[in-house]
Structures are given as structure tokens and as C-alpha cells.
Amino acid sequence: MVTWIRARSTPAPYRAALRAEESRFRAPQRGDPSCARGFRIFELRNGPRKRAGSTGQTPRGDLMSESTRPPASDEPAFRYTAAMAGEIEARWQAYWARHGTFETPNPSGPLATDTPVPGEKYYVLDMFPYPSGSGLHVGHPLGFIATDVFGRYQRMLGRNVLHAMGFDAFGLPAEQYAVQTGTHPRVTTEKNIERYRAQISRIGLAHDKRRGVATTDVGFYRWTQWIFLQIFNSWYDGEARRARPIGELVAQFEAGTRQTPDGRAWSRLTAAERADVIDGYRLAYISEAPVNWCPGLGTVLANEEVTADGRSERGNYPVFKRSLRQWMMRITAYADRLLEDLDRLDWPEPIKLMQRNWIGRSEGARVRFAIDAADDGRSPGEIEVFTTRPDTLFGATYMVLAPEHPLVDQIVPAAWPAGTREVWRGPERHSTPGEAVAAYRAQAAAKTEVERQSEGRQKTGVFTGAYAVNPVDGERVPVFVADYVLWGYGTGAIMAVPAHDQRDFEFARAFDLPMRIVVSPGAGRPADVDEWVEAFDSYDAQAVNSANAEVSLDGLVVVEAKKRIIAWLEEKGTGTGTITYRLRDWLFSRQRYWGEPFPIVYDVEDPTHAIALPDRMLPLELPEIADYAPQAFDPDDATCEPAPPLARANDWVEVELDLGDGRGVRRYRRETNTMPQWAGSCWYPLRYLDPTNEERFVGEQVERYWMGPRDAEDVGGVDLYVGGAEHAVLHLLYSRFWHKVLYDLGHVSSAEPFRKLFNQGYIQAYAYTDERGVYVPAEQVEEVDGVYYFEGGKVNREYGKMGKSLKNSVTPDEFCDNYGADTLRVYEMSMGPLEVSRPWETKAVAGSFRFLQRVWRNIVDEESGRVRVGDAEPDLETLRALHVAIAGTREDLNNLRFNTAIAKLIVLNNHLTKLPVVPRSVAEALVVMVAPIAPHMAEELWAKLGHEGTVAYTPFPVADPQYLVADEVTCVVQVAGKLRDKLQVPPDISEDALRELALASEGVQRALDGRGVRTVIVRAPKLVNVVPA
RNA sequence: GCGCGAGUGGCGGAAUGGCAGACGCGCUGGUCUUAGGAAUCAGUGCCCUGAUAAGGCGUGCGGGUUCGAAUCCCGCCUCGCGCACCA
């Protein structure tokens, strides 16, 4: 229990306080002569302004000289100004760095210390920043400041706090920049990281800098490659519901406990055949799949890198769907677990919902329809469909195959069968089904996905000329090709039930197909389906017209009907109940230079099977190559082939290696694709834990300490993960997947990477355009009566992102010059709740600055620079103000409500302002409570108040309940729910006494105006509500 | 189209069934000043009133539940986000 406030005793006389203050300045000189503190004190005594720009002693004298708000000449010498803030901040940041104040000990391994780690820990994490070339603006650090405040608070609660920041530094921008300027991506990346680090450290974030790894560090991506191989060398055991090493699969085949695909004994298979079988199980595998191919960038792209109108986010080049051989990750194997475990996470509900929708689990059935023997006598096959409504099987009146469906070619007969309607032959009324289908498929292939959609929901398609047989009633139904059926989902084929599916309904109307009602819509609809204007797709209804000789669904509600028909289908062997997901496997390769190389080689004599490099050959470093640009293509040429830059590094690609597999030195070709940017961000939280471990990607004990589950129910993971909602699905789903594989293989003890997630809002800004539509500097725009002017001319106001090109960007550096980092921290935290986006308003910053200035003035005399607190005990009113503030601040900080926490500290500070002398004990409590938010000023004041060392580990004050109850409370008196009077009453007043008082009160009498009283609601001691007759 | 979230002073926001507008910006007035774009003190939802007291109105709009609703329920409007023919 933390109770230092009450434990404090023997208040020292005022003069002693002054002595303590002075000794505090001398003390550090003993331990650290390089600090030159005496010199600075001298300067401080002579006023902060003189020092601006004059000293090489402070780390950032150059920055301070840029202060654009020079104080007026009569300003008190010891006022808290931007210049003084700059000096204090630089000095304490240097102190923290020198003393390793925020170097967090591990329980074991390289970062362990001699002393045991605290039992309670807290791992707070920001989403991995990408160090872009344009540096930070004040919007970026919002979340960083929040985690820092929270982490510092946790530390003051006695916990071992881990907070670090590294960089997600691979990626296309550095590569693009390299192409333009000839600078190596590593040079650009390192420069950007350095710039970011400088900007971030100026904000005073309590990061353990030893842990700030970058994905581009060889020591980091060595383990990214290792994890990739773990995934590559694993398969998903559906029975056990977990990943297992591939060796255990081989053992099953060898023992005969698992059947080979064609039933032959494992020993009878050739090495290549075995490799084929095994590759079909791996969690990382190569497959031929339709991908986003962007010739303009020379690489395939992930879906998230393609804009809504089908162009590359970067460069705005066209993107084509191309079937290419690419690396995939079998994330779909984890679909169920990724879905189920969402329930165990403390995440915002909307994010969970987005993941649920993205995974898109739907229960239904696969049903096989026999293809009716074609006129030319070719042997009939089967079409398998997926449906979520097998209960409507009796209402299926036609079928549809996706244009890409391979069966299409096989079922098309030579001529249109009898009964083919005009519209079924396509708009050109083709004379054979072959022509019609070929034309339709060509048309569909030429369209981008976006084009398919932008043509509205107009249903198109053609008849294949083939019929299939409905297994429930033997009826022949025509088979169509239409692009409203997607090849990528389910089986790429559907049974169409137009009466009960809106899409099928529209198609049926367009193609003059029959409809059959098999789910009763009740009395609300005409009995004749021809009169319907839309499909009836409710689940809350009963089946009708759905019976054959063996099974009847009639009268059953949808859920029951589904069960019965699935049972029947399974019994007849024509269908099975099944589950389908919207989630697709994850395309994992890129044709880029600036990414992690795959630790994979191919035997030159068998180039189809990927071979893992043994661990001892890691890291596989990126080779230096002369030309790292992806090969340039005509951006509109959809037919060209990707050519990864690494393929041009011949000396690197062609290698002779002994892989230790007993075959000796052989010739291999390396994989020339690189991994996507997501790879490093999938596991970086684990590396922060143990950044220098060379034996393991993270020490076992270290991982268990920081991320292990707290109890049997807990999934473990980072205690608090803060970042924007834009990563709701991709990053958060990918890293959950990787983490689960590592968990299954026994490498980590936590089942999930992020126990609690918090989505911060964004800082937005106004931008202004003149009459030409050109952006003008937002800083210089003036508002008069709601109209905005720049240099005398009217300008338009827009609201949105902050950015250099919008001329509304404010950098943390210029902000710190003008106000100081502590003001930036207070302002950003007080603007509103963390989860809400808010507009930046430079003029509103003054309030935060003034708050700090007043805290300073309450403790330090602005004229003399001396501590001006008194040692008298605080009066009761002050004690109450203090303890109310303590209780409120704790409550707010616990719930990440920084804005209201600051408001409570302001209230306390404003109270202290009115006192002739601020009591020392209250001043100290205030400084400690301010410390998480404005740590530099708090350190300075804490030292001035006579304390040695940092305030960062000082226990956070605890409220004394005795001061939380007032001896009088305000009772609200209402009449008919409207406020009519207020009474000052003792908190323990009885209901009856309060009722009497209220009824007798002037306000009640006036409001009643002679009316009688029906009821009186009494909620002692806070409220009475009189209900008039 | 479907799903999710949000609408409160001039502005950012507070209050999650019990005093609407904490705290801050801005604005108004006073102090100090040669000066104020500094600091400081006071006031500030709107309406009525000379001002006060008292009163009326007020949390996007309309209805409901309740002694009592910004808060809970139903319908609508507006804005933001996500998904978008997923069978």
C-alpha cells in the first residue's frame, strides 16, 4: 500500500527547505562532474532568457535559440517560459539517459539485473511506427504520449513497466526513394529512423531505448526468417486443432496412421511425390493464385495496398488480377480459433466485429448436383455448390458457375438444347453455347473487380447449355455462367433459389427463370410469386412445398429444416454440412528489394520444391545490388511477368551449399521474392522483450514474465496496445495468426499477442485554400466573424488530415521551441478523450501552458526562483481538494481518461493558487500526480522541493477516504423533476428529516403554489423530488 | 444497400438514470502596465428584465418508459467508419 503522503512527518522550517533546494543542485556534481550543473544554476539565477542559444552545455541549445515567442523585458526571471521549459527538458532527458532511468530489467537473460524483478509488471505498447521521410507532425505522437503517461503512472503504482519503441522500417517508400535518388534504401531508412528518434526523445517518452529494434536490423530479421521457417515447417492438425512440426506429419505417413492422397504406402512414393504431399500441408506454401499484379510498380500487392478504384495506393498505377505462383500463409486453418478467441480479448467491440466479418464464418452445406448427360453423350460429372440455406433446396430452379470455374469447359454441349430461351444466349444471341460462354468469360476476365461492381448490380450471364439434377426431387435445372458468383468463395458454384435470395431473384427476373416458394412468407405477400418485387429471405418462417418420398421439411422453421435436410443429404451421400469462411489465405511474397529475404532455396535439379535453409545459415542477409529498383514495365501491360530485383543478384542467387541433409554440397537457387512489410510487425512485441538475445527470438522465462497468461482463463499478451483503427483487420489478424502458430509449437506461453487493445483517435487540422484552390499557410489565416482571410483575401476552410502539402502541419519540434514538450503532452492529453479524433488548435494550447505555469508559480517564486511552499499543515478544505483530486485522478488514469484527469489537477492547482502559501505536502502530491503527464517539470519541481534523484519511481498518492466525505452536502430539491431549491444538509441526514426540510423549503412552496403533494421521492442526502397532486 | 459508432454553449469537451455545460479555448470587464498578442482577478448556455430575485427555454428531430432522461426504448434526420453480389 502506497501511503507516503500520510507517512510524511516533521515538516521542516522554510529555511531548511531552501537549504535542501540548494543542496540538491550541488549533489549531482559529485556523482557526475560532466553535468556542469553549477554553471547552469548560475545561469538560471540570471534568468532563463540569457541562456537561450548561449550554451553548448545543453544538448539542444540550438533548438532553444529558435524560440519564436521572446518574453517581454519585464517578465520575472524565474517564470516558467518556453526557454526555461526547453532547458529543464533537455537537462532531465540527459539525466534519464545517463542514469538509465527507464531501462527496464528482465527476469533473466541479457537484460536481467542482480536484483529480482517486481512481481507486478505492465507491458504497454504503441503500434509499430514506420519512419517516413517527412518526419513527425504533432498528430503522430498522440498515442505515444498516452502510453507514456499511462506507463509512467503504472510505474508509480510500483509495477515493472516495459515501454519501448522500434521501427517497422522495411517497405516500399524507401525503395521508391532509392529509385528516384539512387540512395540505398538502408541509408534512407537509417536517416529517417535517426530523425524519428530525435523527435520522439524530445517529447520525453520513458522508453527503454535498448529495446528499440528495427525490422531492418539483421539481428532482428534473422528471427523473422526463423519464425518463417517455423511456419514453413509446420502443418495444421485439424483433429488436435493446432499446428504441429512437419516431422510429426511425416511420422504419421511413415507409420501408415495417415493415408496418402492416392492411398499408396508412403514408402512407395518417390522423393518428389512425398515433397508434393508434404507441401500440401505446410502453413507456408507456394501456390498459383489470382493476385493483385501492378506492372507500374513491378510487384504484386496486398489487397490493402490497392485503392477502391483498383489502382495502387502508391503511384496510382492500374492493378490487374493475375494468376501467379506466390507464397501463401495458411491463415484459413486458424479461422475458427481466430474467431473464437476474440471473445477472450479486451478489445473495442467494433474492432472485434470487423475481424468477425472479415473472417466471415458461415455455416451451411455442400451439395452435389449431378450433371445431366449431355446430348453428345459425354459422361456426366457433378457440380458441388455451397449454400447457407440447404433448407431451400426444393426451391432451386437453376444453377450458376463462376466464370473462372474449370467445370464450365467440360459441360458445354455443342448446340443449344431445346427450350433455350433467347436471352439465355447472351446479348449477341450466339449460335452455340460454346461461343456464348467463351465470349462471356473473356468479357469477365477483361474486367477488373471494380469494373464488375461499378456496372451496378445489373445481373449478366449466359446459359451453358447444360442441365444438372436437383438431388432432392430429380428435377433438371439449367446451369448458367454469371459473374455474380465469385470463384474465390465457397465452391465457386451455387444453386439458385430465386424466391428466397435477392441476387438469384434479380437474375431470374432478368433471364425469365421460374421461381418456387419453399419458405412461407405468411400473409404479408401475394400467393403468386410473379407479383413479388423482392425475394423473401427471412429466417423466421416455415418451410413449405419441400417434401419428397423420403424427407419432408414442411412446417419446420428454417433452423430445423436445415438440420433435417443436411441429415438426409449426408445419409444419401450427396451433401454434407460444412462451414465456409470469407477469409482467404494470405499472399506473402513481394517482388521487392527492401524486405526480408526468404530463407528458402531450390535444388537446381528439382526447382518446384522449396527447401528450408537450416537454422545455422541464418541470417540470410540481403545482398548489396547495384540496381534495387523492380524492373519497370508498361503500367498498362497486364501480361508482363514480375521480375524481383533479387533475381538480378546472380552471385547471391546461385549458390553451392551443404544443407546437412546428407546429400553433401549441391547447387541451389535462392528464392528471390521478399517478405511483405507485415512480417516484422507480426512479432516485434516479442523482440522488445529480449532484443539482444542471440540464442532465441525471445527468452522463455522473459516471455512468460511479460506476456504469459495470468490465470487459466487469460490469453496473455501485451497488457495495453494503443494504435489507430486502420490496422483493425490486417496487422492485428496477421500477428494473431503468427502468435498462435508460435504458441502451438510451444515457443510462447501466451495464446494471443494483445490482451487489451485501445484505438486512439486522430489529431486533425483545418486547411485553407484560396480562390485558385491553392493551399495557403494555415498559421497565417485569420478569422473575422466566421470568415477566413489570408493576406486580405478570403479563403475556404477544409477539415481533415495534417500534412506538409496542406500547409497546416505543425511539427513537435517547433511546438517544443514555442512551448516545451510538457505543454505538448498536457495539451494533447487534455484535448478530449483519447479514442476521439479532434481538431488541432494552436491558440488553445495557451491553456495547457498556463496550467503548467501556474503549477510552477504555486511552488517557485517567479522573482527569486526560490521554493515558496510552506510547512504548515494544510487546512481541511485544502485536504479535501487534494484527496478528491487524488481519487479522481487515479480513477481517470486507470481508465485512460487523461482529459478529465488533467481537469482534476487543474481544479486542485486553481485551489492552491488562492492560498497565501501552498502547503509543502500538497505541493509534493501535486508534483507527483503531474509527473506522468508533465514529467520534466515534475522532476525539476521535485528536485527543488529537496528530493534526490528522479520522481519517476515515487509512489502515486493514495486518497484518504476521510477527506472524501464533506460534512455538508448540497441536496437538490425538485418539484415535478425540475430544480426548485437547494439545501445544505449533513451527509447522514435521515430520509424523513430531509423530506420535511424539502417540503418546507421556500422553493418547493413557491413551486407548489398551493397544490397538494402526491408523492415525495427521497434519495438522501443528495436529492428530493416532490411530485405535486 | 448492410453493419457499427457519434450528434451537448461561439469552439474542444464534462456529466452514462438524479444540480446539464466540469476543465480548457474564445469573448466581456477590472488590476498591473509607456504598451499588451504577457500575467492576474471576475464574469460568461439562450430568452425575459434597467439590473437583481423569481421565471421561461435548452443536449439533432418526433414519440415512449420513469417521480425524474443528454443518459434507457422505438422511429426519423445528419455526419463519420467498415464491408460491399461472400451464396
Image (cartoon, rainbow, N blue to C red):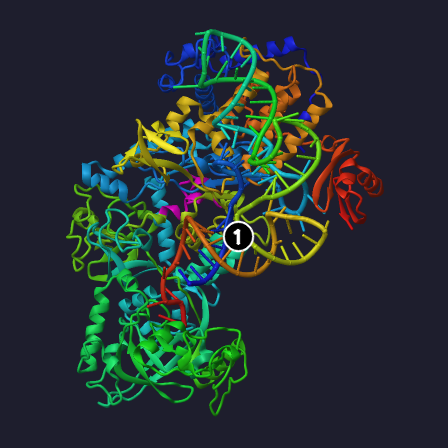
The image quarter containing residue A122 is top right
Residue located at (69% from left, 22% from top): A8
Q: Does the magenta stretch include residue A710?
A: no
Taking the view exactly as shown, the residue that stands out farthest to the bottom is A549
Foreground of the two, A807 or A823: A807
- Disc 1 marks which amino acid? Leu
Foreground of the two, A756 or A558: A558
Foreground of the two, B30 or A191: B30
Q: Name the residue under label 1.
A: A345
**Residue A758 visible here:** yes
Q: Please report, as a chain letter, where disc 1 is located.
A: A
The image quarter containing residue A661 is bottom left
Crowding near pointer 1: few (<14 within 10 Å), some, many (20+)? some
Q: From the viewer's perspective, is residue A176 above or below residue A675?
A: above
Q: From the viewer's perspective, is residue A500 above or below residue A877?
A: below
The image quarter containing residue A2 is top right
Q: Give the range drawn in magenta.
A: A680-700
Where residue A95 appears, x then y in whole percent?
A: 47, 21
Foreground of the two, A109 or A326: A326
Total marks in image = 1
Residue located at (39% from left, 89% from top): A474
**Which secondary structure, mark 1?**
loop
Q: From the viewer's perspective, is residue A699 above or below residue A257?
A: above
Where residue A540 appears, x then y in whole percent?
A: 53, 74
Q: In this view, does B38 lie to the left or right of A437?
A: right
Q: Is residue B12 left or right of residue A945?
A: left
Where residue A598 appears, x then y in whole percent?
A: 29, 51
Q: From the viewer's perspective, is residue A343 above or below residue A705?
A: below
Q: Is residue A698 magenta?
A: yes
Q: Is residue A667 left or right of residue A23?
A: left
